[in-house]
Image (spheres, helix red, strand yellow):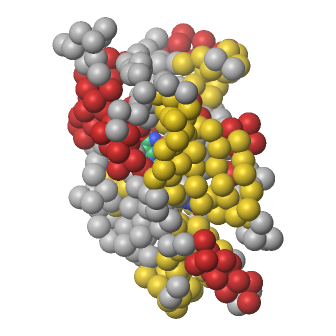
Amino acid sequence: MDIHQNYDLSHCNSFAVPAKARAYGEVRSKQDLVQAMAYAVEQELPLFVLGGGSNVLFTADYPGLVVHIALRGIETNPLGTEQVELLAGAGENWHQLVMYCLKNKLYGIENLALIPGTVGAAPIQNIGAYGVELADVFVGLEAVEVSSGRTLMMDRDACEFGYRDSIFKHSLEGQVVITCVSLRLETRASPEIGYPALASELATTDSAAVTPEQVANAVMAVRRSKLPDPELLPNCGSFFKNPLVSRQQYERLLADYGDVPGFPQPESPELIKIPAAWFLDKTRWKGRRQGAVGVHEHQAVVIVNHGGASGADVMQLARAMQQSVAERFSVELEPEVRIV
Ligand SMILES: Cc1cc2nc3c(=O)[nH]c(=O)nc-3n(C[C@H](O)[C@H](O)[C@H](O)COP(=O)(O)OP(=O)(O)OC[C@H]3O[C@@H](n4cnc5c(N)ncnc54)[C@H](O)[C@@H]3O)c2cc1C
């Protein structure tokens, strides 16, 4: 494996902000990973794992070794007649995996079509969209512990998945490199079409006969109409998580505004999830621009780089957005994006 010094990361992050890694290597095999980890120890460098760079914001040069995970491979094993276990290398592209599954009549992740990034990053924030999240089909993963080089096998419980959350954002943050993910998929379709935007996109289709391919196409159509393409307008998707508020606070908001979308959490019904975009719409952030950065004209939760922005510029805008929501609603918006 080649290790490059002073490596330009501006093409490795979907915000397209400038940053350099002190050292950078591409991991295509387990042997490459062992070599990279040994290099980091020898040189006393911190290690940062990079997938597709679609959920990271570099605010400065990285003073250590960045390893880009390019471990490939897809394998399937039948589990009885109606389920299949799918094993995918961490460097596989997530959307291409969704397309592979549809082509091979394996169902369960069609609602997650067109989410950018790699398979190995999917467990980090338990990716989710249109009523489905990774945890719904997740079986386990294989990872390598950075401190010891030990291989760990982790099942669904061990990953402590939550809404855009997992153990990898807490006690295991930066501690493991995920090398392979295993999913349980169905051979018989049972499309999940309850999510409002998806239901309205499929309104003219007979809901009893809707196919997973139609679901994936509908998801892609909605996403293309709503979200800016990072190739054309660099961004990281939703910059903030949807905040959870108490039922009491939600009722106060309802009394004041009448039109607050709220989703009680099945595991804790006293907590209501409100779209971050609702707060940002009310504080009039949609379409606003601050120098080279701005808020997308159709999506108040998406920060975009209009060209030439730095990570610090993005953070300055993000803080101003957080502050105005906190001042008006006493609600803290938490970044979904990993700030490095
Ligand atoms: C336009 C757009 C739309 C998006 N829509 C959605 C959406 O609908 N739902 C959603 O959930 N997300 C969405 N995202 C966010 C993003 O696509 C996901 O978070 C994705 O999983 C990130 O993958 P990545 O490979 O780019 O990860 P990166 O950005 O490279 O890394 C993200 C984090 O994961 C860690 N990481 C990456 N790979 C590994 C590994 N192999 N082992 C250990 N740690 C690792 C990194 O260190 C970092 O902390 C969107 C992003 C964009 C740009």
Residue at x 43% of width, y 27% of height: 187
Q: Where is residue 68 in the image (x, y as percent from the top left)?
A: 51, 71
Residue at x 74% of width, y 90% of height: 42
Q: Is residue 1 left or right of 200 when viewed as pictured?
A: right
Which one is nearer the viewer's eye here, 219 or 263?
A: 219
Q: Where is residue 197 in the image (x, y as percent from the top left)?
A: 33, 23
Q: Is residue 122 left or right of 192 when viewed as pictured?
A: right
Q: Where is residue 87 in the image (x, y as percent from the top left)?
A: 53, 48
Q: Is residue 231 left or right of 239 when viewed as pictured?
A: left
Residue at x 74% of width, y 36% of height: 157
Give above or below for 98 relative to 262.
below
Q: Where is residue 17 in the image (x, y as percent from the top left)?
A: 41, 70
Give above or below for 162 relative to 63.
above
Give above or below for 50 relative to 39.
above
Q: Is residue 106 left or right of 64 when viewed as pictured?
A: left
Seen from this angle, which residue lies furthest right?
148
Which one is nearer the viewer's eye here, 103 or 300?
A: 103
- Image-quadrant location for residue 255: top right
Residue at x 63% of width, y 80% of height: 36
Residue 12 visible within the image: yes
Total number of numbered labels? Answer: 0
Which one is nearer the viewer's eye here, 187 or 323?
A: 187
Quarter of the figure that contains the C terminus: bottom right
